[in-house]
Amino acid sequence: MENWFKKSPDGFIYFVKAPKVITHIKKFLGCKPEIDQLYALCKRGLSDKLSCILFQLPSSFHYSSEKLNLIIESLTRNFKTAVEFRHQIWCSKDAYDQLAKNNIIFCSVSHPTMPSDIIANTFVGCLRLHGNPKMFYSEYSHTDLMNLNASIVNKHLFEEVFIYFNNTASATGVLNALELSRLFKY
């Protein structure tokens, strides 16, 4: 990470995705030391170029108030942190509100099995576009990108927003990102 910091230009920022051992294998159980270490390593290595840390959970991780509390208790509040859920049962006012109270960003997704709503539970937004209807492959049309841009900009949903394309099995993710960057005037 220190090398990434040194090699990147001024103004460049990193958005770090947490390891699967935390999110998919242990599913936050007994992971507080690993999570604290991740935050410390990212802060030390990336310094002021660290923008946010993302914890993306698998679709098998279903909602419960105990799981929500486990996530909240495991994360450090003085970092920008986003959580991406892959099961629609997490799309609830309780989850949005509890995460917001603890300064945790609810990551909105474009995913075949998830609602397409953009959730603004904090002043920082995170959107991951995975391809829909075919994950990793589907291209977003010009109209899709215009609507996405309009919904974020016209509604003034966020003070800061991170948008990532993960429909990268071909060149579509790169092409979609370039097109959205031309449209996006925030």
Image (cartoon, rainbow, N blue to C red):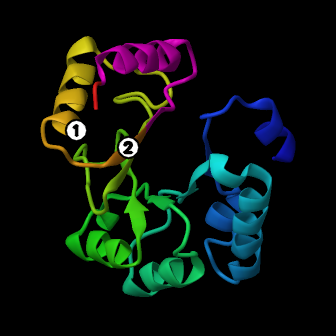
Residues 155 and 106: in front is: 155
The answer to which of marks 1 and 2 sits earlier in the sequence is 1
Q: Are marks 1 and 2 in contact (CB under 8 Å)?
A: yes
Q: Residues within 10 Å of mark 1 (few under 14, many from 20)?
A: some
Q: x, y percentage for residue 82?
A: 48, 59
Residue 183 included in the magenta stretch of the image: yes
Residue 145 included in the magenta stretch of the image: no
Q: Does dot 2 land on a helix, a strand or a loop?
A: strand
The residue that mark 1 highlights is: 152
Q: Does dot 1 land on a helix, a strand or a loop?
A: helix
Residues 32 and 153: in front is: 153
The residue that mark 2 highlights is: 161
| Quadrant of the rendered image containing residue 89 | bottom left
Horizontal side, residue 7 vs residue 49: left or right: right
Q: x, y percentage for residue 11?
A: 60, 34
Q: Residue at x 81, y 31 (%)?
A: 7
Q: x, y percentage for residue 78?
A: 54, 72
> CA separation, marks 1 and 2?
9 Å
Q: Amino acid at mark 2?
A: Val
Horizontal side, residue 170 vs residue 95: left or right: right
Q: Residue at x 59, y 80 (%)?
A: 74
Most extreme residue toward the front, as rendered?
A: 10
Q: Amino acid at mark 1?
A: Ile
Q: Which residues are magenta?
A: 163-184
Q: Residues within 10 Å of mark 2 (few under 14, many from 20)?
A: some
